[in-house]
Amino acid sequence: MPHILKAYSSFRARGKPAEEEDGDPEFYTVLVVDLFTERSEKLVLPPGCGGFSAALVRLGLIPSAPWTPSFVFTIDTLELYRVSHARCPQFSIYAFTKTLADLHGVPPRSTMHQHFSIAFDLYLDLRRRTEAQVLHHLGRDTPAWRMKNCCPACTYKLEGEDQLIFSMLVTMDGNDSLKRVLRRGPDDDGPGESNERYDDRDASDGYYLSREEVDAWARRRLANVLPTDDNGEDNPCKERWKNMVNDVTSKMWGIFDNTGIFLCLCHHGFALVLVDMLKSGELSKYPLAVVEHLLKHFGIDLGVSYDIGCHFCTTLNNSELGPEAQEAHLRCLVGAFHGHAHNRLCQVCFLALYVEGLGIEDLEGCERRFSRSNGLAGSCRRASRFHRQQEITAYFKHMDDFDVYANLATFLCSNYEQCLKILDDEPIVRRLMCEQDVLDGSEFVQALADEREYLTELYKSSKKTVETPETRYVACLATLDTDSARVTECKAALRRAQSDDAAFAPGKSKAEIALRHATEKKERTAVAVAEIERELSIVTRWSHDNPRYIAAEKLAHLLEYQRALDRLELLVVERLFELTKMNQSGTGYKMRKHVAKSLQARSKAVRSAVARYNAAAAAAVTPPRDHHGVEGQYWARPAYRAIMNRWFRLERAREEITRLDIEIPRFVTWMRDEGVFLRALRRTEGKTEEEVERDYELALHVEEYRMRRGRFDQSHMMRLSALKRKWGLRFTASLTPGVPLLHVAMDAGMEMDVDERAPRAGEQGDLSMQEDEGKASEDEDNSDIEGDDAHDERVSEMLFKLTGLGIDAEERGESIAD
């Protein structure tokens, strides 16, 4: 493989070698498949490549077999399919090979897709190995480097930044579209044993958590941490979202090996972590493993969104990660789309609109990503474990570089404009606040707290059971009367069964069994009655006309009525508040359908609560009328609530601008520094001809690595500059690069002048970063970074040395001083 990799690297850097006239050349005739032609060609194999396959790769051809291949494919053909498949996951190898046959004017071959798949695997492996060499040369090959540096707006922190409530926002969720069928042998009794061939190849590329990391949170470890009714910590959504407990106790799907993926993204859309869900649903071990990984590498003040974040919060606090998560101030959140399907008590605690510091983020990036990655289902369903992982990793890597990063400036600019337009409504909101006699926004914060307290009290009241020994005694007496009546009925049924007219039944009849069970139940109830009588020192058993019996029975009916009323009020008030979202202006069709479906699914609970209330009211005879309902609460008025929500939206818009004023300079600084650092590797000053020749191929691969994202930098700066020109002084973010925090240099005690940590703002670069030069000419935007500026040279060399030492030196288990 090293010879093939070297041949591939030489071809990408230098093209096909010239044919040598001297010596005895080696020839090989093979069918070459190109984009528009399919031809039998007599190839002159270049000498000194280290093997037959390496010689073909040196010519730009990828074989489908190590020796005597039937087909060879040009690298351009394979690259076209790689990019096309990444853009359109439904575009399969089978469809592509048929497309080639149509272009070549030949009938499709039944085995062509198999040969192409083999060659494509080799091509992707060569790309991975080449990239690994580049990352190793750049000092970026530590396990978590990709995750910690994939999003410049989230992770490229600068000196002098303001402290945010959430240092980083992430969202995670599971998806079961990318399932993989486990290949099994035939068996008469059902699915046979697995007959898959062992394959230890790895295509994770730093995206996947290992199975060992996930299995550390397996079912046995979760047995005592899942929220239940007995752990003393009630969750308002436990009746609605039971999938976590159900998933743990459910049977795995025998037909599938991989049942989906669990994905974690930053709020800009970059993939941080991927986890394979194995023979199970969306178990708690997957989000717990992801949170453990995030805490390990990103530290404090994380905001983690999950569609059942309210329920997961209890699970996390009860787990071994609970103390660490609380110490790191990690907060569980719920996305805006899923949040409106939760009950109102959950919304006032977790809904994005009411969470301070969240901005206008909806935290639903996973749903948008899944809507596109679902196209991979056809390619993954019957693939091997390695090929499925390769498909998923290649897709997310391409999306990060060519979709998410390409639209990062658009994302930031769109959010900024949206916030400014929201703030345009502030005078109207202030006028409406005066009409409602609201002095400032602190009253809305207090109103939300009062609503939370009110709903919490109703929830607790509907669940608690207040009993006295007298009420328990009366309830046991009523149960004893019922059991006695049941015994009498069973005795009568037994007499009928034993009469001369009854049909003969061998063994004990059902009537005898029923009588025995009824008698045993009556005896147990009688024992309970006797225990209470001893507790209350009752000598003579109470009769139904006993004054104490009547008083205790009345109290029990009133308590049941109160619980039924609180439960009904809680459900009705929550539904009314939740229904307001359906009729709110600006609510999309999908959101309306989502809320309507959730409310419809919970309508059965309301009907049950009404039936329970009617029964309790009838038993109470004269129910109390002094219950203080929601109609007397100031925060329940529709007009007040509408203004409150608009005010909270203004606050979230201000917070989003504060976050964007930090993220935009990070992004601008990263573009400048990344270009300076990677372009420095092309320098030839001070190198001998041998060193230049030796580093030539690697330098070209580094340039390809830079251009994956660097091709978009100019358009990013144009969008940011256009936004600044459009909004003028209202745009408060700086487009001048700042000074990045170089943690490794500081931790190692390296003495560096502040000016040497990164290039100064406005110095030479492939982008014009001057804040006031939004209309810079194309020549200035493309100014050559390889000038003779001595300071730029010194800065580039220092950045290279720092990265060579390793931005994540701690992960290597070594120090820079060593």
Image (cartoon, rainbow, N blue to C red):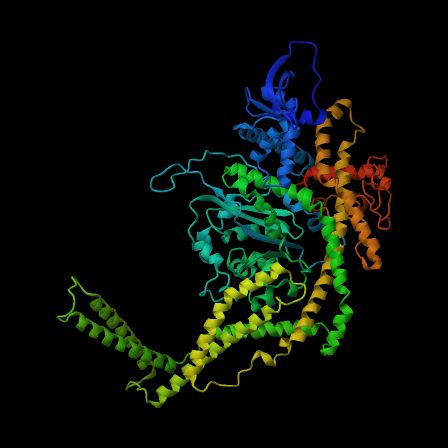
Residue furthest left as drawn: 500
Instruction: Using the image, determine if residue 19 lies above or below residue 751.
Output: above
Q: Quadrant of residue 654?
A: bottom right
Quadrant where the N terminus sits is top right
Q: Is residue 560 visible?
A: no
Q: Quadrant of residue 208?
A: top right
Residue furthest top as drawn: 23
**Left or right of residue 502, residue 239 in this image:** right
Quadrant where the C terminus sits is top right
Instruction: Using the image, determine if residue 297 lies above or below residue 491.
Output: above
Residue 596, given in percent of the width and then of the height, sits at 56, 64
**Left or right of residue 312, residue 423 in this image:** right
Count up the numbered dots.
Answer: 0
Question: For the point 74% across and 54% down, which residue is it?
Answer: 414
Q: Is residue 120 visible?
A: yes
Instruction: Using the image, determine if residue 153 lies above or below residue 815.
Output: below
